[in-house]
Amino acid sequence: MMIQKKLLVLMDGSERSIETVNYIKAFIPLDENTRIVLFHVWSGMSEAYRELGADLARAGEVGRLRNHETERQGKIRMYLETARKMLITGGFPEASIEIKFHLLEKGVARDIIAEARNGYSAIILRRRGMGALASIILGSVAVKLLQSLTFIPMIIVGQAPPVKKILLAVDSSESSMKAVEFTAAWMGGHDYEACIFHAIPGLGLIHFDLAEMRRACTGGAAADTCIEAFKLKIARMFQVIKDRLVSSGFDPEKIFEKVVTGVLSRSEAIVKEAEAGGYGAIVVGRRGLSKVDAFFMGRVGHKIVYGGNRFTVWVVP
């Protein structure tokens, strides 16, 4: 059954947001069932300047500011229209692209969250917006959204080339399996390459996955035996994932599997694999298996977003 793929694309007027549009053209499959909404939150004149309007002595100044804001608004509308035309020239049907110029109500992040509840399949944003410092990995709005958008997949666009290679960082959590489903639904049948990847920490480390390892072993099993049993469990999980990808249209010859053991940090191992393999996106579940993951986002997913700052990261709840 065909599902509607509705993307909320955040546009802030910056060159970085235009690069997000280029990412969509290069990486998101061209599908007749895809709808794209280019969304901008317009804050307009600041509250301090609005208050000046009551001061007749400053009426001329306020008038000039209003003219400036009108000019700025016109530039933003032209900017959004430019982004729309870029997608059309990239092959997306004109009727599938909508521009939403939203007047600020409660706050930029809160207004985006409210819009995201209107039947979207995913939200796409840049790591940093207009005016962000080069040393900042995520802008303030992106941080707020990462904390709050627990009900919708987020595609956080980085600078790495958008090649058609996906690194699926998985465990046996429900969130991880949803990430697989999301990848299958969006990318199946469009000639993408996928690597199913799992990192097992060293047994000498304090790590919540140890409990999962112990459940995979018989009582009193040696450490090596325990790891082998856990790897067997992972192999079965990989087969389920591969079957799902193949059923969605992935070429079996373009699906790869990799398990690494004894890593000090799962997130670092995932990012290193993405770097070594030249992947265009890292896909991760928002929450993993550990008790710590009861918070807004699991430790591993959080570290991948920050540590893999060059990469586009898909965070799936």
Image (tube, grey):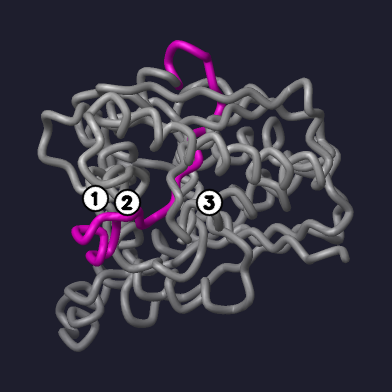
95 vs 317, nearest the viewer: 317
> Is residue 150 placed above or below 136 in the rendered structure?
below
Task: Find residue 254 and report its horizontal and vertical position in percent.
Answer: 73, 22
- Contact between labelled residues 2 and 3, with CB atoms less than 8 Å apart: no
Residue stretch rendered in magenta on the structure = 274-297
Residue neighbourhood size for the residue with mark 3, other residues' Cα within 10 Å, grouped as few (<14), some (14–19), many (≥20):
many
> Could one spot residue 270 in this view of the protein?
yes
> Could one spot residue 15 in this view of the protein?
no
Residue neighbourhood size for the residue with mark 1, other residues' Cα within 10 Å, grouped as few (<14), some (14–19), many (≥20):
few
Task: Find residue 117 and report its horizontal and vertical position in percent.
Answer: 53, 77
Residue neighbourhood size for the residue with mark 2, other residues' Cα within 10 Å, grouped as few (<14), some (14–19), many (≥20):
few
Give the residue displayed 28% in from the left and 24% down from the top: 224
Q: Which mark is residue 180?
A: none
- Contact between labelled residues 1 and 2, with CB atoms less than 8 Å apart: yes
- Is label 1 or label 3 in front? 1
Q: Distance between the Cα atoms at labels 2 and 1?
A: 6 Å
User: What's the residue type where badge 1 is placed?
Assistant: Ala
Q: Which residue is mark 3?
A: 124
Task: Find residue 220 and report its horizontal and vertical position in percent.
Answer: 20, 41
Q: Which mark is residue 211?
A: 1
Q: Secondary structure at mark 3?
A: strand
Can residue 288 be found in the magenta stretch? yes
